[in-house]
Amino acid sequence: MNTIESVKEKMVLVCKVLQQQRLVDGYGHVTVRLPDNRILSTPLMPPGKVALRDLIILDMEGHKLEGLGEPNGETPMHTSIYKARPDVQCILHYHPDELVAVGVAGVDIKVVANCGAHFYRGVPVFDSPILIRTNALGDKVAETLGDRNAVLLRGHGGTAVADNLDELLRLGINLVRTARIQIMASSLGPVKTHSREEAEAILAIERRGNAMRRFLDYYISETLD
Ligand SMILES: [Zn+2]
């Protein structure tokens, strides 16, 4: 069982990797579900600049319980998803250009590369650019996400969900990477996409512990070395 301190350390590291990969800038946020209906959250500041002392703890209504910083304006997106999806343990929300580009093009994320296999069940698009600052909007995003692991927000960004921070980082990186490849490939002409069987075969390999370790080791070393 992870202690809160080790979760905090992992969350700060995840944010630094996202920053090093230029997937977050001044905006974006990461949260983790904690026991007793609490949420660990990056505060209202650039996520890549967050230190351990900056992290805050919220209740499931988004009210701050601990910490000096203020909650992000889009906290309702996180609380709504946690309420709708008991399986979700952590959430990343960010605004990479690639996700904004695909989200406005009306083409959906397609599995055009192995790094996109995670998303073969589809990545729905929340059809509004408005920031998710109310519970009503948060509930609509959660409804659009459904049982998938990511959702795009038209003209705004994307949100990925996972059951642990390692997986969240992998999804967060791979969603942008597969979107980038899709944009590149579709500029050349019609693209072929993975079948469900092909995507599931790739995922079976990806789920091996050493595949995840190698992925994380690379990005963490790029960030820390
Ligand atoms: Zn946003």
Image (cartoon, rainbow, N blue to C red):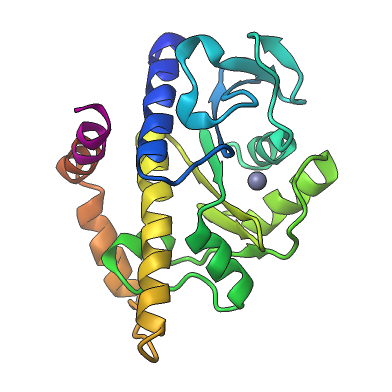
Q: Residue at x 46, y 13 (%)?
A: 52
Give the magenta-colored segment's residue range: 218-225
Decide if residue 86 is in sight here: yes
Q: Is residue 220 magenta?
A: yes
The front one of 20 and 135 is 20
Q: Residue furthest front?
A: 26
Residue 37 percent across, percent down from the top left: 66, 20
Q: Which of the image's four quarters has the N terminus?
A: top left
Query: Which residue: 25% across, 38% down?
Result: 216
Most common secondary structure along the magenta stretch: helix
Hey, which quadrant is residue 74 in on the image?
Answer: top right
In this rendering, the answer to whether 110 lies above or below 38 is below
Residue at position x 36%, y 26% in the image: 13
Total numbered labels: 0
Residue at left offset 65%, top offset 56%: 156
Residue 192's place in the image compared with 148, above or below, is below
User: In the displayed structure, would residue 190 be above or below residue 198?
Assistant: below
Residue 207 located within the stretch drawn in magenta: no
**Left or right, 219 with reference to 195:** left
Position of 156 compared to 150: left or right? right
Q: Is 180 or 49 nearer to us in this picture?
A: 49
Q: Position of residue 133 (x, y in %)?
A: 79, 40
Q: Which image quadrant for residue 136? A: top right
Between residues 51 and 190, which one lies in front from this camera angle? 51
Q: Position of residue 123 (x, y in %)?
A: 54, 63
Quadrant, the C terminus? top left
The answer, for residue 88, to whether it is visible in the render is no
Q: Residue 85: image x %, image y %?
A: 62, 42
